[in-house]
Structure formats: structure tokens, C-alpha cells
Image (tube, coloured by chain):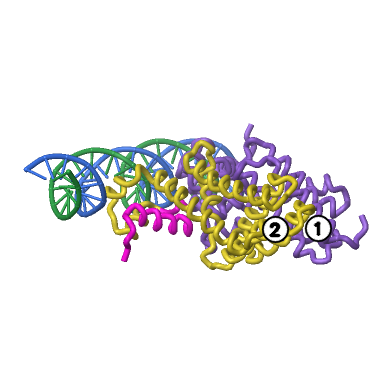
Chain colours: A purple, B yellow, C green, D blue
Amino acid sequence: MTAATTRERLLGVAGDLFYEHGFQAVGIDQVLDRVGITKTAFYKHFESKDDLIVAVLQSRDTQDLNEWLAFVRFKGAQDARRQLAAFFDLLDEWFRKPEFRGCLFLNALTEFPSENDPINKAARAHGDHLARAVTQLAGTAGARDPDALAAQIMLLITGAIASRHRAGDHDAAKTAGGVARVLIDAACADAAA
Amino acid sequence: MTAATTRERLLGVAGDLFYEHGFQAVGIDQVLDRVGITKTAFYKHFESKDDLIVAVLQSRDTQDLNEWLAFVRFKGAQDARRQLAAFFDLLDEWFRKPEFRGCLFLNALTEFPSENDPINKAARAHGDHLARAVTQLAGTAGARDPDALAAQIMLLITGAIASRHRAGDHDAAKTAGGVARVLIDAACADAAA
DNA sequence: ACCGTGGGTTGACTCCGAGTACACCAGGCC
DNA sequence: GGCCTGGTGTACTCGGAGTCAACCCACGGT
């Protein structure tokens, strides 16, 4: 059944619970109950709850990034401009899900606001990785100023997530996507499709 | 010196601490130490920590909203379109401050994700109030679809806040404001300034 | 056959934050 | 004088994080 190692199961279960209820709101015991392990055993895998949180963020970082890029590359075919726009299709799908509870990494940033906090650093790293990918895509799309376009797109992405999260606006991705398409076209005016 | 009532001082101190460190991360004892009051006295003013949090959010709601609208009315003169744009000047000033830690209400939403939670409701109320004000402004500005324009502006506002909060992007308000001005002009194309 | 190691168990313990219970005290108000 | 409001102090429960000591069992290496 569960072929995964205990460490992997801990990361999976903890990630799900943290996402659903928040990091501080979830007790380690809840995680352990669901994994079926005792406290002592847990502390042989992780030094602390914070350590677990960092590990969760790191594992989801690469996982999520790969999923996103795969989706965008598939949906946007070979066209970098369409790939950029496809981010908002991805968001739209995500926003339709009832389990949506915002972005795990943005949530981590607000729960651990101190910049020296390892958790904060791990969460920021994900944003940086995504921003780097978007900037690169903006470059190959032929944007005059890839950094500027990427900043705008990142702002729209985080804005859409926060809007869906806040007022429960299910159409936030469509709203943001519409704006994004205009910005992308304007920034790449010289490059023919 | 402190002419305020104890309840007011509790709201003030708690609000500051919650904003700086997060709601769950701040213990009631820290608040009480700073106010100079004992636990028993505290519980004669508020039923619980959650009750305190709700009260803080409610008091900041009207407070902040009034400040925002006053700024926008001052800076935007009588022109509704310029008043809408002025929101981003306000954000820009805010984002320059080193104490910036995101939006208290957005933070509350991520720390208390359950929709039935009174804290969650109180935080959502603030967003609704702001959205209502923006929609009204969009109407008097002559937007063809005030709700749509307001949704776009709200998305840009929350996006800017989240971007500043995440990567520490100090220019997020300028980025969002530039986009907003384009959207506002497009949505009010028929109405002459 | 033997030993070490990794992953696991139980149970009792500390520390800290939230919240409660009880007894007491000052001042204003009518 | 009596009562309500806003305080004080101490001592308590309860739950979550994290520690500690002792033990178990399956494994791979020599």
C-alpha cells in the first residue's frame, strides 16, 4: 500500500495538514496520529517542527515548480508568449478546486514574517525560483524588458491567488489573465507570433 | 500620558504586536506585559484571545478605511479617476516603510483559514468594505462596468501588497499603479476628464 | 552465530501559553 | 452604606513542543 518511506509520508501528511489548517494551527501530534508513528520516532527524522516545515517547503518547491512548468509547456506548445499566458489557465484550474486555501509558500511567509527565519527563507526561495522561470520565459518571448514583464506577471499571479483566497473570487485567474495578455502583447510588440 | 482606556490600549498594543509577529506567534502574556495588566484583568475585557483578535480587526477596519479614503480624496481632488489611481500612491508610501509586514487582514485570513471562524469573517469584512468603496468610486468615475474595474483594481492592490510582502519588491505599487492607470482609462474611455 | 545500526515502541518528564477559579482591594455613584 | 467597575495576586488545568531512558526487532557485515 504505502511504499513510501516514513520520512516521505511525514512530508506528505504534514504538507496536506499545514495547507488545510495553517502551520501553527496544526500540532505535531495530529501529523503523527495520521502517519501512525510516535513522537520519539518523529524526532529521529526531524530535529523540530520548524525543521519539518522547512523540509516540506523544500520538497514542495521543486515538486510544484516542475508541475507548473510541465503544464505551461504542454498548454503553451512551443510559443513562449502562450506559455506565459498559460500560467493563468493553470491558476484558473486550481482556483476551481474547493480545497483551495491559497499558496502554501505565501501562507508560510505570513505565518513566519521574520526574514532570518529559515522557514521564511525557504518560502521566499520558491517565489524566487518561479520568478526566475517567468523571467526566462519573458526573455525568450522577446520582451523588451524581461525583468519588468516578469515583475508584472508575478504581481498578477500573487494578486490572483490573494484575491481568490480573500473574497473567494473564483474568476480571479480570468481577470488577471486578461490583464496579463495585454501586458505580454504590449511588451513583445516587435516580436511576431 | 496615556489618556486612552485600558480596552483601547489593549487593542492598540495587540494590533501592533500581531502585525509585527503574527497572531498565533504572539502570546497574550506579551500583550499584557506591555500594557501593564494582569491576565485576570484582561479577561474582564475580552472573552478570549480570539475575541481580542476580532476586536482588533474590527477597530482597524474602520480606522484604516477612513484613513485610506481621506488620503485618496485629498490626493485625487474631486476627480474620481484620479482618486482611484491615488490608491497606488498610498500603497507606494506604505511600501517604503521598513515596518511593512503585509496587510493585517490578509495575514489574518491566512492564519485563520476556516470560513466559519469569526476572525476569518471579520477579516473578510474589511476587504468587502474596501471593495465597496472602490466599486462606488469606479461608478462615479464613469466606468462602463464598475464591478469589473473594481475587481481588477482590488486584484492589483492585493497583488501589490503580496509582492511587496513576498520578494520585498519596494516598487510593487508603482508596477501595479501603472497597470491600473491603463485599465482605468480603458474602462472610462467615454467619460471625458 | 554475533554484533551494530536504524527505525520503531512505551511512558514519564519539562516548559510554556491559554484560560479558569478564588479571594481581595480601590473608587465612583446614588 | 452598598454595589458595580476595574483592578491585583496566586494557584490551578489543559494541551502542545520537545527530551529522556529503556527496550524491541530486523537487517547486513564479518
The stretch of residues the image draws in magenta is B1-26
Image height check: is A94 above or below B187? above
Q: Is residue C30 left or right of residue A82?
A: left
Q: Is residue B160 visible?
A: yes
Residue at the spot of label 1: A137
Which numbered tag is attached to residue B43?
none
| Residue B9 on the magenta span | yes
Quarter of the picture containing the N terminus of chain A is top right
Q: Residue at x 45, y 55 (%)?
A: B18
Pick the residue in front: B71 or B142: B142
For mark 2, give the secondary structure.
helix
Location of residue A46 in the rendering, given as x and y in whole percent from the top left corner: 52, 50
From the image, give the main secondary structure of the stretch colored magenta: helix
Residues packed near mark 2 inside 10 Å, few (<14), some (14 to 19) or many (20 plus)? some
Q: Is residue B156 left or right of residue B51?
A: right
Q: Residue at x 67, y 60 (%)?
A: B82
Residue at the spot of label 2: A129
Pick the residue in front: A44 or A84: A84
Image height check: is C10 above or below B9? above
The mark nearer the N terminus, 2 or 1, is 2
**Residues at marks 2 and 1, CA–CA distance in whole angstroms:** 13 Å
Give the residue at the far right of this rendering.
Answer: A192
Quarter of the picture containing the C terminus of chain A is bottom right
